[in-house]
Image (cartoon, coloured by chain):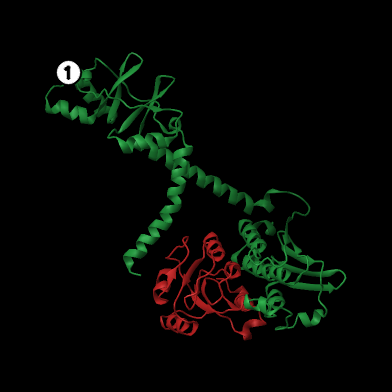
């Protein structure tokens, strides 16, 4: 792939996401929310010399022309230039204004104004509500409004993250913990791993370091796939997160492991060829888990089923969930 | 090496849409056993594999894999592609076989991110998330 195509691909991917949100906003935001309300208006009998003065001093490029309460035209720099060419500044505005006016409704979504801007040459639209002029909208107003809304989105997301990662600091109790429970279905190889994926995201959100998050995720994923592969009726994963420790329980109701000691030996597996073809059943799952966790206990009997308990300490090396809170 | 350069070296075709092609890849791991991947791979690697089921993506996600190359022109099922896009992991199909692909990437300077069985007992590779 050459440089050109790669650049193009990057822009289209990155832009695609933003555009979608901006498109959404064009429908969500109302014209009322982005328009300029304190718009300058010009009376029908104003002289073009005064229009020029208003535009120059107020740094505006156009304004609606009013006959009493009614908008009867729009005067823009384009009209003003024509007037200057004609050297006709003493004329009244109604001679130069465009009286073929398009309106935007305050209650309409921004996209309606955008359509008019795209399909016509106009640069500004008077905004009406109940037949009265309530503001002016330009492309600049829309850009500013959309940017503000995007910033708002961003802040909300930041706040959500901040709150999750400070959960343990914000809530006072003698022992605070978050418990997550997941039901694992047997032989579901399409959705197997979803619980681990959700737990990984939860840990990231709660402010777990990449190292801890990775260890816990790998251990839980191996445990989850064991439930998918080996159980009769599936099982349950329960994760309890506390500031200093994560405790994980993966349990099922059968068929149980005949020889627990043998099951813990690297390379030992009862998996079928079909399971092996999918990349599992190499007899390394429990070995992997034991490497990722600080303690592990495997209990099993044919009558009750299997229970795998794992613990990961978060205190050592100061890399726990929200380590600031644990230090206090 | 970034994802874009990886595609070039692998003569590959990008199969996922939610990919940052500038994302840096720190090394590679070639394996068809998912437990091997989970046991040995270090973070931010590319995984070279002949397996195409959705569990490859889940494995990659748990192990912080940046990209996956399916060897010998294999095309994964839609479920795999969907999951890769959802988890923002780049997936690439390469016509090359495992041996040749490993050779080419290694020659291009990409280091191995596979931990050996010797490190296995010490639990090194899990802690190695820099």
Task: Give the letter of the chain under mark 1.
Answer: A
Q: Is residue A154 above or below residue A60?
A: below
What letter labels the chain drawn in red? B
In the image shown, does A210 or A266 lie closer to the viewer? A266
Badge 1 crowding class, 10 Å Cα cut-off, few under 14, some 14 to 19, many 20 or more, is some
Q: Position of residue A195 (x, y in %)?
A: 67, 61
- The number of discs equals 1
Q: Position of residue B45 (x, y in %)?
A: 52, 73
Please give the residue where the numbered disc 1 appears in the rendered image: A91
Q: Is residue B57 above or below residue A18?
A: below
Quarter of the rendering occupied by the N terminus of chain A? bottom left
Residue A42 appears in the figure: yes
What letter labels the chain drawn in green? A
Q: Is residue A115 above or below residue B38?
A: above
Residue A240 appears in the figure: no
Q: At 41% from the left edge and 19% from the top edge, which residue is drawn?
A: A131
Query: Which residue reaches farthest top?
Result: A68
Question: Is residue A292 shown left or right of residue A160?
Answer: right
Quarter of the rendering occupied by the C terminus of chain A? bottom right
Q: Position of residue A95 (x, y in %)?
A: 19, 19
User: Could you say whether the residue bearing mark 1 is in a helix, strand or loop?
Assistant: loop
In the image shown, does A276 or A156 lie closer to the viewer? A276
Res A70 → quadrant: top left
Res B125 → quadrant: bottom right
Q: Position of residue A285 (x, y in %)?
A: 69, 76
Question: Is residue B93 shown left or right of residue A242?
Answer: left
Q: At 62% from the left edge and 49% from the top edge, which residue is drawn?
A: A163
């Amino acid at each position: 792939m050459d440089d050109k195509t790669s650049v193009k691909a990057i822009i289209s991917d990155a832009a695609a996401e933003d555009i979608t949100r901006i498109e959404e906003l064009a429908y969500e935001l109302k014209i009322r929310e982005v328009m300029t309300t304190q718009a300058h208006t010009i009376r029908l009998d104003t002289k073009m010399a005064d229009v020029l003065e208003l535009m120059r001093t107020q740094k505006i490029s156009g304004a609606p022309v009013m006959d009493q309460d009614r908008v009867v035209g729009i005067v823009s720099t384009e009209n003003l230039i024509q007037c200057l060419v004609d050297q006709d500044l003493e004329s009244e505005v109604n001679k130069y204004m465009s009286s073929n006016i398009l309106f935007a409704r305050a209650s309409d979504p921004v996209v309606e104004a955008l359509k008019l801007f795209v399909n016509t040459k106009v640069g500004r639209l008077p905004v009406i509500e109940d037949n009265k002029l309530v503001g002016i909208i330009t492309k600049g107003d829309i850009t500013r409004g959309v940017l503000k809304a995007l910033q708002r989105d961003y802040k909300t997301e930041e706040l959500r993250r901040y709150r999750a990662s400070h959960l343990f600091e914000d809530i006072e109790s003698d022992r605070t913990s978050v418990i997550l429970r997941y039901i694992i279905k047997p032989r579901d190889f399409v959705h197997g791993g979803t619980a681990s994926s959700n737990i990984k995201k939860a840990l990231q959100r709660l402010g777990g370091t990449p190292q801890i998050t990775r260890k816990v995720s790998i251990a839980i994923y191996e445990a989850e796939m064991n439930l998918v592969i080996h159980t009769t009726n599936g099982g349950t994963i329960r994760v309890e997160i506390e500031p200093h420790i994560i405790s994980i329980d993966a349990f099922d109701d059968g068929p149980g492991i005949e020889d627990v000691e043998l099951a813990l030996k690297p390379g030992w597996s009862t998996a079928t060829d079909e399971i092996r073809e999918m990349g599992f059943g190499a007899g390394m799952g429990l070995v992997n888990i034991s490497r990722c966790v600080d303690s592990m206990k495997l209990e099993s009997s044919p009558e009750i089923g299997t229970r795998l308990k794992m613990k990961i300490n978060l205190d050592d090396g100061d890399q726990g969930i929200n380590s600031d809170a644990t230090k206090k | 090496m970034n994802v874009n350069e990886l595609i070039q070296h692998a003569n590959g075709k990008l199969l996922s849409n939610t990919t940052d092609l500038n994302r840096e890849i720190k090394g590679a791991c070639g394996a068809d056993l998912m437990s091997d991947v989970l046991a040995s791979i270090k973070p931010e690697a590319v995984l070279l594999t002949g397996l195409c089921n959705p569990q490859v993506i889940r494995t990659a996600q748990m192990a912080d894999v940046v990209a996956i190359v399916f060897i010998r022109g294999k095309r994964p099922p839609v479920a795999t592609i969907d999951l890769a896009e959802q988890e923002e992991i780049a997936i690439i199909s390469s016509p090359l076989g495992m041996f040749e692909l490993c050779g080419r990437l290694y020659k291009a300077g990409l280091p191995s991110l596979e931990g050996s069985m010797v490190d296995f007992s010490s639990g090194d590779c899990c802690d190695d998330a820099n």
